[in-house]
Amino acid sequence: MLTGLGLLNMSGCVSPLYDQAEQTLRESVIDSVRREIAPAEAQPEPVTMKHTFQVDPLNLKPATIAELEEMAGLDSYQNDPLVISPDLQGMEQKVVGISLEHAIHAAIQQNLSVQFARLAPGIAESQVVAAQAAFDWILFSNSSFSSTDQPRTSPAIGGQAVGLGSDIRKVVDITSGIRRRFNSGGQLTIQNQYTYTNVLTPGLSTAPNPANLANLSFQIDQPLLRGFGSDVSLAQIRVSSNAQKDAIAQLKSDLLNNANQTEQAYWQLVQSHADLLILRRLLQRGIQVRDTVKARIQLDATQAQVADAVARVENRRADVLRAENTLRQASDQLKALINDPQLTVGSEILLVPVDRLIDEPVVFSLYDSIVTALSQRPEIQQAILAIDDASIRQQVANNARLPQLDLRMQLKLNALDTNMGDAYSNVGDGRFIDYLVGLVFEQPLGNRLAESGYRQRRLERMQAVVSYRNTVQQILLELKGALRDVRTNHELIAQTRQARIAGAENLRSLRVEMETIRSLDTNTLDLQLRRQESLAIAEQAEVAALVNYATALSRIYAAMGTSLKKSNVQFQIQDVNQGLDTQAGRWWIPESWANPDTADDAQQDAEVDADAENPADMETDEDMVDEADPALNLEAEPELSDDTQAPADLEADDLPDPEVQESLPEALDDSDAPVEPESDEPSAQ
């Protein structure tokens, strides 16, 4: 019996072959990812973008450049009022300024998609609790009352019946107890059974009568091969825990995407606003030229030339109307993302950006950016969790290949008396004791079901590893594409700005000629219209390059998984692995990837909330607080860095948060399929 009780305290163990296979897989994962980052690791030094913009080829004086900046460019529109047509209700358009800082924080706190996604971790946590409930103590009780009055056949001797002709009795049976499953896969049952029997059969005497039978039994059922060990019994809990971590990672991914979408929508609003101002000024300039052409109808202007000037003005007016519509659409898109109760999509309030576009160069390191992405992207953690789940299921399938050999041990203390109290008092005397030890063995011939299931799980884990490799490659593609876009658009800013200055100088020179040496004729006015349009196109191209540059910068942070930290948003979660001490599916990030200089910052960025109960909560405005979800904290700090300024660098300045750091695998297999060296023979220790 002591041996049986000892089995209940066993947490299970893992085969040495399994440990060897896990280590081999881990090493192959390390080699694969290091192969991906090896070229960048060879030159980890940061690179500074250089601005190649030069105005020397134009031979312009500083005073002239200042005049050109007043003629065109974003700085020249600072004092221009926003003139726009009435809204859909026919009222004067109401305008509200909004900053990028406010837009991102409002979107993270109030976006409807985020509110939907934040519930998923709470649902997953309920599934973890449901899986853990399999190991709760269970109280059970069964009771029955039977009244028997049955005739009986009796033997006859010489034609005379011998024995009793009936059986009359009343029986009360009550069974109650508690039972619980243990990590070893076994079950302990403590049970009390009380039976009251009153024999009323005529001619039959029993002693004692009525009889009170009481017994107390202790029973252990323990699998010794199939189903043995904590790695099998806790498998569902670990899978459910991984599902909760996957839900948290998905929530973080949704938040990153939401922050990135909001920032891109904001810069699109900036571009739409700038385009409207540019086209509005172009229209005003065209009206002046048109009026001048009309005034010369009595001199040298023909009716065709007047019609051409009018047509150009009306085309510009149409472009202004299209720009107004584009601005309103961009405003509604941003309002839908931020879901501000004061700025609803249904309202006709027009959002106008207050942040300016930037063109400062950045410092970045490809190697550090890759390391940060592989440490911070939630997709990496989700791919790892898929490997972990596949490893857990494979281990369970491997155990299922073993024969069934179950041990049952039972100790029962019995007592019988005419009085129920005396019967229970005598149970402790240990005078009547029953012992039971039994083994149950079963093994399918051929074992094809278990073998095919194990092969399926091995292939599924291979798929999970290949999927992880694909995830790593896709993240690197996204990151490198964003870095290239930043560099390209930074160069385009210089080129488009030079084109805009040249276009402004072209228009300024024509104006000077018209005031001095060039005669004011219709050809000159036509040339003036064309140069105005060329300047407006150059201005729009410059704005587009600035917007693309800002958008590419936001994509870099999104590709690295640091958009939330850039926006000073704290993503806090609790440890969902507390109480789970098993071996399968554990991964670690290589220490060589860690940046010791920023470890403290990373810990602050991923602070674990020990008092949290539900990892699905995020702090919002008072109207949006959900008291049922107090754990996951997405708190936007009140003081924000200026999002309109270029970052000083894009080097890796975070370590993975604790959840990612514990589970991030280090690399992938070098071969086309992951190495699976473990033995085909099932084993148990």
Image: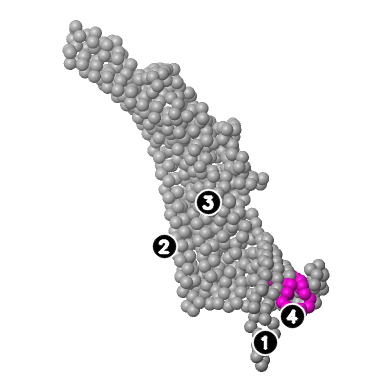
Q: CA distance from mark 3 to mark 4?
A: 74 Å
Nearer the observer, 472 or 64: 472
- Circles 3 and 2, Cβ within 8 Å, touching? The answer is no
Residue ID for mark 3: 246
Residue farthest front in this picture: 159
Give the amino acid at mark 4: Gly
- Residue 421 versus residue 38 in the image, above or below: below
Residue at 69% in and 85% down: 163
Give above or below for 328 relative to 553.
Answer: above
Label 4 belongs to which residue?
203
The alpha-carbon separation of the residues under discs 4 and 2 comes to 86 Å
Camera-nearest label, 3 or 4:
4
- At horizontal 49% and vertical 79% (from top left) the residue drawn is 445
Of mark 3 and mark 1, the one earlier in the sequence is 1
- Label 2, on which residue? 672
Q: Position of residue 544 (x, y in %)?
A: 38, 31
Q: Amino acid at mark 2?
A: Asp
Residue 169 image-quadrant placement:
bottom right
Q: CA distance from mark 1 to mark 4?
A: 14 Å
- First in sequence: mark 1 or mark 4? 1
Residue at position x 58%, y 69% in the image: 227
Q: Report crowding for label 1: few under 14, some 14 to 19, many 20 or more residues within 10 A (C-alpha).
A: few
Q: Is residue 204 magenta?
A: yes
Classed neighbour count for the residue bearing mark 2: other residues with Cα under 10 Å, few (<14), some (14–19), many (≥20): few
- The magenta-colored residue range is 197-220
The mark lying in front, picked from 4 and 2, is 4
